[in-house]
Amino acid sequence: MSQEIIDFSTQHNDKRSEHFGWHYLADCELILNNCLKSLELYKKSLALAEALGDKVEIGCEVQGVAMSLAGLGKNELAVRLAAAVSTEWDTIGVDIQVQFWNALLNRYIGAAKQSLEDADLEREWNQGRSLPFDEAVALALDQ
């Protein structure tokens, strides 16, 4: 069904719906712990969200990339990206609370945080908090 949505959206130049289709597929892969596949899919969705200029959706996709990276053992980078999103959302006044998304964040980013020594966690979190958001997006797309 999602592929049909993506195909239809592409044919009709509906980037927002196409973005949501890729995001949904990425969520499914992440839930199944297929983190290499979810990384690929979140990056597709991120590129579309960036083209739309939607900072909330861009943030969600960067979080998706971060969770995928955490699932692949790239914990420092995952924490840095998660911190960058946290800072951006603080700046624009966003606080998204979706139960399944929070559970995924806890599962992946929470585990990434726990895997790091306190000093390393603090360093990566602070680096992410000071990272300009456009640089965080570029970093996420580069993975």
Image (cartoon, helix red, strand yellow):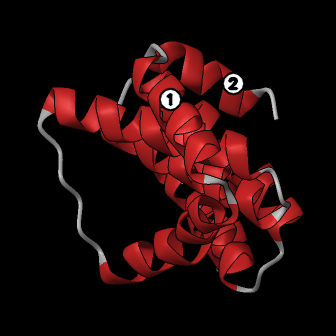
Left or right? Give the position of 102 relative to 79: left
Residue 7 or 32: which is nearer the viewer? Answer: 32
Query: From the viewer's perspective, is residue 22 above or below residue 92?
Result: below
Q: Position of residue 115 (x, y in %)?
A: 69, 64
The residue carrying mark 2 is: 139
**Mark 1 vs mark 2: in front:** 1
Left or right? Give the position of 75 relative to 36: left
The residue carrying mark 1 is: 128
Residue at the image point whose x is 38% and y is 74% from the top: 102
Residue 94 or 13: which is nearer the viewer? Answer: 94
Residue at the image point whose x is 44% and y is 50% from the top: 60
Judge whether residue 8 can be spotted in this image.
no
Judge whether residue 25 can be spotted in this image.
yes
Assign the C terminus to one quadrant of the image.
top right
What whole-number distance in Å separates the C-alpha atoms at marks 1 and 2? 11 Å
Query: From the viewer's perspective, is residue 36 above or below residue 53?
Result: below
